[in-house]
Amino acid sequence: MTSIMVGTMVLCFALTISVAVSIGLASVLGIQASNANMLISVKEMFGAINKFPLAAIPFFILAGNLMETGGISRRLVEFAKSIVGGVQGGLPMTCVLTCMIFAAVSGSSVATTFAIGAILIPALIKHGYPTSWAAALQATSAELGVIIPPSIPMILYGVSAEVSIGELFIAGFGPGLLIGLALMLFVWAWCKWKGWGKTDGEGRLSFGRATLQASWALLMPVIILGGIYGGVFTPTEASAVAVAYALVVGMVIYREIRLRDLYAILRKSVISSAVIMFIIANAGLFAFLITRAGVPDAIGQWLKEVLQTPFWFLLGVNAALFVIGMFIETSAAIIVLAPILAPVAQHFGIDPVHFGLIMVVNLALGMITPPFGVNLFAACTVARISLDRIVTQLIPFVLVVLACLMVITYVPQLSLGLRDLAYAR
Amino acid sequence: QTTMKISISTAQNSHQGVAIDTFAREVDKRTGGRYKVQTFYSGSLGGERESIEAVQLGTQELAFSSTGPVPNFVPETKILDVPFLFRDKAHARAVLDGPIGQEMLGKFDSKGFKALAWGENGFRHMTNSKRPVTAPEDLKGLKMRTMENPVHVTAYKGLGIVTTPMAFPEVFTALQQGTVDGQENPLSVIMAAKFDQVQKHLSLTGHVYSPCIFVMNKAAFDKLSAADKQAFLDAAKEAVKANRARVDEDDAKGAAELKAKGMQVVENVDKAKFVATLAPINAEFEKQFGKANMDKIRNYK
Amino acid sequence: MRNSFLRLERLTSGFAMAAACAMLALASGLGVFQIIMRFVLEQPAEWTEVLIRFSLIWMVFLGIPMAFRQGAMVSVDVLYRWSKPGMRRFLDWMVCIAALALMAVVLWWGWDYARRGEVQSMIGLEDVSMFWAYLAMPVGAVFSAIGIIGNLLDPQRLELETAQ
Ligand code: NA
Ligand code: NA
């Protein structure tokens, strides 16, 4: 049954059938092949999205669209530019820093790509950066959207592996900072080497002006994180607060969203959310069927027997996730794999929160690895170039993140230090 | 050989895990290996509501679950959620194993289930981060995460609790950050969810008895031969014995273990005062469920 | 024939989309309301969470018809980009048939599931049966089928612009 399912799925992928339909059809055939009750198909599709923490997905997408239209994103860019924009290569560094700030509000990388890329990719092109490089930079930086909390993949991991979402969030700061700083250092060096971006510092606002102008935008991460850690709302509810805040600031304070813009914003958000949630529904059905067939247990046993030590287990898992991440959407991969891998990791004495960070960072990398990477799709759209042109420019970026991933994997304190401090362990 | 699936939402090493492991072994033994029961733990096949529904639909043959979501399928079981209905575990077990409980098991038949036996999840107790709770006054204004169960909600509101529904995966963080002050669950759940890390006070209120139940798909049960039906029923009985023994064990060492982990445990809760405070609410329940029915349970010897 | 179908399709997909937008707006509003009720008024409501979940599920199934219609479903389209027009048309047909097959399953079994859900009340909204939540699937499947055929008759590929 499992081979029929995997075979059908791969064939459907190749025929350009959408990811959701491919996974769904493969599951339907799997049910048929095992003579099980077809009611399972709809029951598990429904069950997979009938989880309150998943409400964060449509809410964050809506909030991102409101922030883009409402001028919050643009002001954040000006703010970041006033800090790191002054040196050679300051504009790409601004891109990374803006993504880091935006990541503290948004739980979705693609929302980050759209919101920031819509402003920074045209700016980068105007300053003479190659379009494909700008798109690759934007796609990679936006990955931070799911590594710096809040984060939808972390919520999914927390739900699937039954790990505290709050702990995962706190553990995301260290790795997020590491990747952000590494990327900034890399683009700075790269620009020096290539001689790019000598005029990046021109026309930027002073730090004071930019901060003043962006004060409402900068208050947003404070409110979101403050609200979560101050006990006002839960991490899931924070996404609804983000919607309300972006709406009020965009409509009342900045007055950049008019009433008649709202339907277009809602429409765009609905399509994006429905697409991703429908993938999750079908991936949930798929995961249910392979769990029911005992596959996860078998894989878990196999990993335990083959990879004898924590060191090799982590290396093996990272390699496996990197390959899986090339082909499978992050959320789907987490839903299927977290319940399988987390118990094995625990068996090796790896903290489930640390392991969650490894999975999230690795699979976030999957968002920028071809052939299937949602950030790539988004960045290509904004930059209006085709996928194959971005790929060669991506390689150095992927290598930087891979290096960070190795540090995150083998230095657990980077993830767990802050958590242990906060949770007084 | 026929393979059937059974699932629980808790881990294998738990009072529910013991139940289905024993059940699987007993079925195997009593049917000479003709029936194999495949066990799934930790909600890997879905949460409690999903599992019970799966049994009703026949997409899964068996499930063992707390009765939390059961009233949404079999409303007659709602009465069991009434606070302080049972004096102690012995009373609750006697009622459920006696004619009242057996009659209630019969109510499942018309909904597509064969209810094999009552098991046990344990008495629910309260934890919070604000203050020790010995009497109902201490509960005034405490924000407590509760199940979205109308009987619970009505009663807890009557005690002055600010009842707060919340998805279980969010409860740990919410308790930690003070989004809610407390929660209520059996000791086994409190320990499994590691609530001791984020809650200071535990009160052994035992305010609600939480049963478990073995449910089987009606059609799957009816297909069994008379002897096999008996084998399944007997296996469930054996499983319940193991399940209750484990609950007793958890209860015996649970409070001590939680105390050792730093929780302040209030063992002497003024239950009479709780019952007195709930009198007006109880009058409502008596109207809803029938005073005779409630008295029959209360006075069962 | 083709044009009258597309006119009908515009109507149905537009209607489903409007309803989905209403569901997203409702869910967002309820999310904020839930926090206010708990944190400010200290009177949490039992029914907000369940309503948020189910309105978002309705949003998903009423939102995918337009996603199918616009070819906005995320896919691996390397083969498509490398193909000549004839092959592309063949792929369009495969995409259409596959999606219709899945929607047929969701329609047939979703309706069966919804009917069986009539005997089960919602947790948190005890007076409402699960029928109304499960109904999202067969209803969404009908709208989706129309959108899928619409996309075959008048292909659009907007996937890149909406991927998340
Ligand atoms: Na984030
Ligand atoms: Na990828």
Image (cartoon, coloured by chain):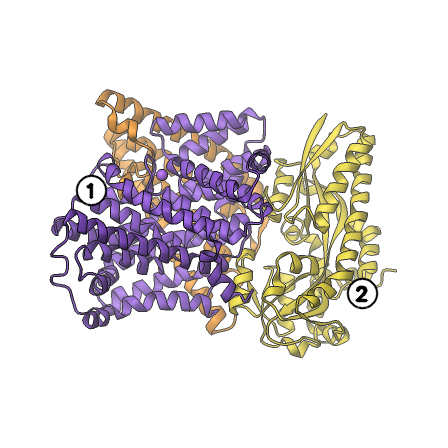
Chain colours: A purple, B yellow, C orange
Query: Residue C122 versus residue A401: which sits nearer the camera?
Result: A401
Which residue is the site of mark 2?
B87
The image quarter containing residue B1 is: top right
Name the side, left or right, on which B268 lies relative to A36.
right
User: Could you say which is closer to the camera, residue C146 or residue A102?
Assistant: A102
Q: Which residue corresponds to the image point at 62% horizontal and 74% vertical from the top-left? A: B160
Q: Name the side, left or right, on which B234 lies relative to A287.
A: right
Q: Quadrant of the C terminus of chain B?
A: bottom right
- Measure the alpha-carbon separation of dots 1 and 2: 73 Å
Q: Where residue B28 sits in the image (x, y, percent)?
A: 77, 32
Q: Chain of mark 2?
A: B
User: Which mark, residue A132?
Assistant: 1
The answer, for residue C138, to whether it is visible in the render is no
From the viewer's perspective, is the residue at label 1 or at label 2 nearer?
1
The three-letter code of the residue at mark 1 reads Ser
Q: Badge 1 local density, few (<14 within 10 Å), some, or many (20+)? A: many
User: Residue A258, relative to residue A30: is it above or below?
Assistant: below
Helix, strand, or loop for circle 2?
loop
Where is residue A330, by image quadrant? Answer: top left
Q: Ligand 2 lies in which image quarter?
A: top left
Is the residue A383 above or below the residue A289 in the image? below
The residue under the point 16% across, 67% down is: A205
Q: Say whether residue A98 is left or right of residue C119.
A: left
Determine which quarter of the picture holds residue A262. bottom left
Q: Where residue B42 is drawn, which disc sits there?
A: none
* Horizontal and vertical percent position of residue A369: 33, 39
In terms of depth relative to the viewer, which is nearer, A9 or C147? Answer: A9
**Residue toward you, A82 or A333:** A82
C54 lies left or right of B132? left
As helix, strand or loop, the secondary structure at mark 1 comes to helix
